[in-house]
Image: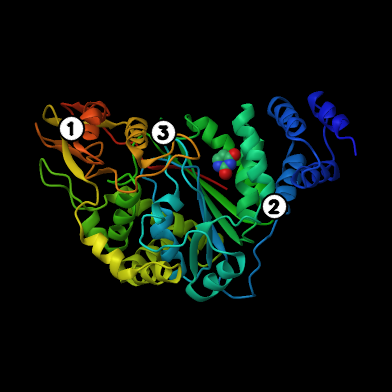
Amino acid sequence: MNFLPLIEAKREGKILAPKEIQEFIREFTAGRIPDYQMASMLMAIYFRGLNSAETTALTLAMRDSGDVLTFPKDKRPLVDKHSTGGIGDKVSLPLAPLLACLGFRVPMISGRGLGITGGTLDKLDSIPGYRSLLPADLITKLVQKVGCVICGQTDTMVPADKKIYALRDASGTVPSIQLITASILSKKLAESLDALILDVKFGCAAFMETKADARKLATAMVTLGKQCGTNTRAILTDMNTPLGRAAGNWLEVKESVMCLESSAAVSAAAPTAGETPALPCDDLRTLVIDSAAHLLVQTKKAKSLVAARKLAEDCLNSGAPRAKWDEMIVAQGADLKAFNRKLALDSTAKIVVEVKSPKAGFLAKCDARIIGEVIRDIGGGRLTKESLINYDVGIDRLAKPGERVEKSGVLCRLHAADSAQAKAVTARLQAAFEISPRQSKVAPLVQEIIG
Ligand code: URA
């Protein structure tokens, strides 16, 4: 078939029929439409947009381009979370076992990091023996048995998105709300979910820099998710400051375990003057509890967000999600003894240096973009898809906005591959922090709920 008329129709701003979109995606996935024609179509979509029916058709066609996970009937709802990504965003790690303990099944299909934002799979790859790539039948089996799995997309899941995303990357068509929406949701819908919570971030280190753009994306995803039969909600969260007190693959796994072990009283404890605690601060815990609470309300397991938060918090405090974490990683091949030995180490990097404050005052800003760029540049992230990762580098003991810092107090600790590397980036890291004589108000982490 000749697909040129469809490309020309979209170029002229015409509306495509769902059948035409389905055929275009099916033929492209099968290799019968060349990349240059798909790239032209993507550019036409970028400029002309897609209406809601077209976006739904595109999303479902992409979902159906490969295997869709199927699960036996079970009273435990199937749920997941997606984050648009940020620095120190490790919420998925403690959230999956928490959700399993709250009576959900969690087939959490995650991705790798590119650029400054980290990827859940890269974090998990720092666990000795952990298998982040599993075949579809094993994903189903483990979800049924353990309650949660965190792994990558199989080769046969949503192949259309893999091919289209590579072309969008190379053709300057990534920032289209409809294409982003279809890309994210086609992958989540392939998990056959009952409910989905989306964490759409905005700020200097987020995919969407402004809250208005994040709101647009969130609204589009919530509308589409619902149209496709999945109860979908979004929260808009601030990504100007890194989440938690650690960023970098292994350091984030460690902080996630601390989050599973912490109680509210400990994690909310004010740091001693001049010190930053190694424990995760409240923002990570808040976001983990809030994400679980929304899913409890969405699936009618709780009547209100207040009641749901209490359920999630009590469950986290019970220690059951910490034990579930071990069960999950062992089911995915982790060597628990080696993992625990690694956890007991203060650092796995060659060198640890303290980044110190040049003056006393209150932390007014901690620029997540600068921190993300530094970690990427020292090997913690990828500059290209082929880049190798150093799992051990990163930062921890991060001071957070609103906290008091003393002169020469620790702003963060840098874990680096060697002293030359540490020396090369210390000044850049220091520039991420702004110290003010007065304590300023800290913006709330979760700023809006959509849907
Ligand atoms: N993440 C995705 O999976 N797809 C996009 O298009 C953007 C972010």
Give left or right: position of 34 versus 408: right
**Residue visible at 56% across and 70% down in the picture:** 138
Report if the CB atoms under discs 1 and 2 are less than 8 Å apart.
no
Colour mapping used in the image? rainbow
| 15 to 25, vertically: above or below | above
Q: CA distance from mark 1 to mark 2?
A: 48 Å
Answer few, some or many: residues within 10 Å of disc 1's Cα (few below 14, many 20 plus, some between 14 and 19).
Answer: many
Q: Nearer the viewer, residue 281 or 33?
A: 33
Q: Is residue 219 visible?
A: yes
Judging from the image, what secondary structure is the residue with disc 1 in?
Answer: strand
Find out if the beta carbon at label 1 lies less than 8 Å from the nearest ligand 1 atom. Answer: no
Callout 2: helix, strand or loop? helix
Which residue: 58% across, 75% down?
A: 75
Circle number at residue 362: 1
Mark 3 and ligand 1: say if the CB distance to the nearest ligand atom is below 8 Å.
no
Q: Earlier in the sequence, mark 1 or mark 2?
A: 2
Badge 3: how crowded within 10 Å, few (<14), some, or many (20+)?
A: many
Image vertical order of residue 262 relative to residue 352, above or below: below
Along the viewing direction, whichever of 352 and 278 lies nearer the viewer: 352
- Identify the amino acid type marked 3: Ala
Task: Give the residue at mark 2.
Answer: 63
In this rendering, the label closer to the viewer, 1 or 2 = 2
| Circle 1: residue type | Phe
Q: How many marks?
A: 3
Mark nearer the N terminus (2 vs 3): 2
Marker disc for residue 205? 3
- Quadrant in which the N terminus appears: top right
Mark 3 vs 1: CB contact within 8 A: no
Pinpoint residue 31: horizontal percent, then vertical percent: 77, 43
